[in-house]
Image (cartoon, rainbow, N blue to C red):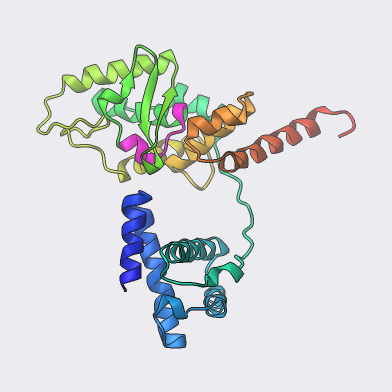
Amino acid sequence: MKARSSFIQYIKFEKRFSPHTVLAYEGDLDQFFNYAKLTYETESPDEINHSMVRSWIVSMMEQKITPRSINRKITTLKTFYKFLLRNGEITNNPMQKVQAPKVSKRLPVYVEEANMKVLFSEGDFGEGFIGLRDRLLMELFYATGMRLSELVNLKDRDFDLGNCQVKVLGKRNKERIIPFADPLKNMIKEYLTLKNNQQFTEHSERFFVEETGVPVSPKKPYYIVNKYLKHATTISKKSPHVLRHTFATHMLNNGADLNSVKELLGHANLAATQVYTHNTIEKLKKVYKQAHPRA
């Protein structure tokens, strides 16, 4: 389908969606047009109407696909048909009459402050280059709130130790600067010194590397974070993104304003950051119930 190929090129090169997102959009379009072919004997985008899309949504709900996943697929179709309409390939947009299912809001899962303090004061990260690397990786996630993809793509030159800040390349290739404190600066200097003294068989400009010198894969931070969070918390989910949630929640709990946290996280809009205020309010309610005489 020519329209589909043009759309994929558009989101890949003009919108600069991540490879993961591009694959998801391709899969969503394949799924919908396969459904349309089987159910309505058409694969032509200009023959699709809102009733067909609604029928597809109902079929997904019957398959127990979550509202969150369904909404993502609807977003794919909306983006696709906006693209076709703008390019003059269709005259009517079938997605205008399509409503997405309601999604219950999930509060971000985070680790309590006291638990993070215990982790870094009493946690055993091991000795040598790998032990320091693992600790620094954990510290950097928690101190900056950066995403997994941002962390694994860091390069030595991204750190400005004189000004205690790091340059991060976020979504849509947007750069942002994140500050950090002196204790982390000292750890980064120690790591770089140790790294430069390693007898690597391979050399990379990436900041986080393995014992051989090759860059760490995206799977490695998952393993490291899961390994050490097991000793710090009983929450079921233990991932790098949990440390991002933890960073944002602790910042807000300690008085940071919402706009500042938004900039530090690299969010495109404030709505994405506001979800963390729910955790803050829940904590205030707990404190109120414990402390107020008439609570």
Left of 274 or right of it: where is 90?
left
Left of 144 or right of it: where is 193?
left
**Res 294 seen here:** yes
Looking at this view, name the residue that lies furthest to the right.
294
Task: Please give the name of the residue rendered at 45% of the width and 72% of the height, measured from the top-left corner.
Answer: 90
How many numbered markers are drawn?
Answer: 0
Q: Which residues are magenta?
A: 143-152
Q: Main secondary structure of the magenta part?
A: helix
**Which quadrant is home to the C terminus?**
top right
Looking at this view, name the residue that lies furthest to the left.
201
**Residue 151 magenta-highlighted:** yes
Instruction: Give x and y (percent) for residue 39.
Output: 46, 86
Instruction: Give x and y (percent) for residue 97.
Output: 61, 70
**Which quadrant is home to the N terminus?**
bottom left
Q: Nearer the viewer, residue 197 or 247?
A: 247
Instruction: Give x and y (percent) for residue 255.
Output: 64, 23
**Res 112 seen here:** no
Task: Please give the name of the residue rendered at 37% of the width and 67% of the height, measured from the top-left corner.
Answer: 27
Task: Please give the name of the residue rendered at 12% of the width and 29% of the height, measured from the top-left corner.
Answer: 200
Residue 64, compared with residue 11, is above or below; it is below
Q: Nearer the viewer, residue 51 or 273?
A: 51
**In terms of image quadrants, where is residue 12?**
bottom left
Instruction: Give x and y (percent) for residue 261.
Output: 55, 30
**Residue 287 magenta-highlighted:** no
**In terms of image quadrants, where is residue 208?**
top left
